[in-house]
Amino acid sequence: MPASETLTTFSSSSEDPITRSLDIKPDTTAAELSSSEFNAYYEIEETAEEIVRKDYKRIALQFPDELLHDSVRIHFRLKARIGAGRQLYVLADTSYGSCCVDEVAAQHVDADAMVHYGYACLSRTSRLPVIYVFGKKKVDTEHCAKQLVEALQSNFLSETTSSDGPVLLRHDVAYNHSAGEIVAKLKEALEALKIPLHYKTLATRTAPVSSDSNSNEDHESAIEYPYIFYIGGETLGLTNLLMTNHTSNVISYDPITSNIRLESKTNKLLMRRYAIVQKARDADVFGILVGTLGVASYLPLIKYLRTLLVQHHKKAYTICVGKLNPAKLANFLEIECFVLVACPENSLIDAKDFLRPIVTPYELEIALQAKQSWTGKYVLDFGKLLDGKKSGDVDESDMEQEDPDQPAFSLVTGKYRHAKRYGGKVTPITEMQKDGSAVVLRNQDNQLVKTDDSAAAQFLQSRTYRGLDPRIGEDAPGVLEVGRSGVARGYQTDRTTASGS
């Protein structure tokens, strides 16, 4: 293979960002629609009316990669309806996940409102009001309701028994326009089986700004549903539904293929995440990855995570690198585990290609527990993690009460290990025993001090190559000698050296 085609996991050439081709499958749902159908699919009239009614002047239109081919048509149709004096800006290549509102990019054009197109995680924003346009994908409501009820009867219900609990209906946001009709048909079919149906209406298409970090998530009740109906394809939303409802039986229906199936991959996902939690238990240096700048409660969560790590004597670094890839995170070799602060749709990262494990904030809480106990419950919402925790406070009952110096058994290596303890203060070197691995500094009074609280400095001291260190005054000067001269095929040497050879 030519050297130019050789790719490595942790590095890339300078030409790669320009020449790399992206594997994107365009969403062609609206490609063959007529002009009126196109306007209805993307809610052109409703969106323009909302912009004019709220008197927005600078509006950012955010598109995922798979809908960029429709952005020009949408821009011109909206522009013709909102009148003069208003500017529209098309946003692409979002800073993080395309399901989140990219408020950072919108601030570059000083926008006062945003219109988000396509799939959305519906996380509340902290700066700008948002108009959501999900699209209106077709679904055969009659066939959908019939298939879901038949799957429930054939897999879980017998002729003499009925359900021992209600059924929860969840769906992809693209089918929100047909939710009312689907709910009506399902209720009619389930009433004959004496099974109640619970359905939670999605947020309104216009999302206001949320200033309360703990009230920005509309939490579901604590009811454990034995059966869940899901309408949509294999998306991150379905994966999160399986993870957070591991005790429920999930039946999914894909309107595009009209296929129905019983989802049964939850146990494998949980076991994989549990293995990552065990790696996080062995880590002493953590990197808090900022994976969103739009979700309203991301700052309180970062503060809470830093407080939690400090109180457990772990070292924490806060890192903002945009979209994640192995090459970026490989630059932080001193970090032993990463914690990703992102929306629920982008929190689960398959880190098999990364050098270090990547966990969610809830998995970090599990890893820092003194006793290894996990019931399988899984939480991805910011609000649920921050409930009852004001200003980043940590519950003292979660702190480890045992001897911190006793060794802990690692399920990853199968050996006992002594955890490092960070958080000490910088003290004069005369009061401490000299340590060859310590970093020696001078304070503003030109006094020698020693710090052992820097994970990066300790990692640097353990490396064989530490950069171009001048080592002034540490090495004895060498004797000057006359070197060789000439070209490589015939060097001219000193006569004394030549005669003695």
Image (cartoon, rainbow, N blue to C red):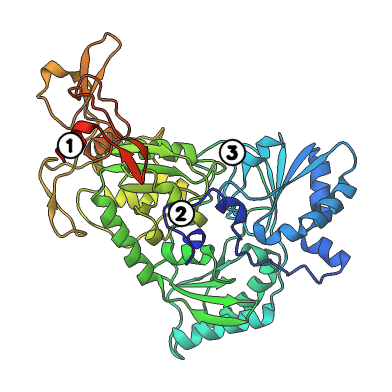
Q: Is residue 244 left or right of residue 218?
A: left
Distance from disc 3 to disc 1, alpha carbons, whole Å, reads 82 Å
Q: Residues within 10 Å of mark 2 (few under 14, many from 20)?
A: many
Q: In front of the other: label 3 or label 1?
A: 1
Work out whether 393 lies above or below 253. above
Q: Give residue 142's position: percent from left, percent from top.
A: 68, 81
Give SS at disc 2: loop
Q: Is residue 453 left or right of residue 102?
A: left
Q: Residues within 10 Å of mark 3 (few under 14, many from 20)?
A: many
Q: Quadrant of residue 83?
A: top right
Q: Is residue 212 left or right of residue 143?
A: left
Q: Give residue 372's position: percent from left, percent from top.
A: 22, 55
Depth check, front residue: 75 or 224: 75
Q: Any mark on residue 347, and which?
A: 2
Q: Quadrant of the C terminus?
A: top left
In the image, what residue occupies the spot 59% across and 71% down? Answer: 232
Work out whether 387 lies above or below 200. above
CB contact under 8 Å: marks 2 and 1? no
Q: Which residue is mark 3?
A: 126
Q: Give residue 333's position: percent from left, percent from top.
A: 33, 45
Mark sitting earlier along the chain (2/1): 2
Whether residue 394 appears in this view of the structure is no
Give the farthest residue toward the bottom.
159
Q: Any mark on residue 499, and which?
A: 1
Depth check, front residue: 129 or 328: 328
Give SS at disc 3: loop
Q: Is residue 227 left or right of residue 53?
A: left
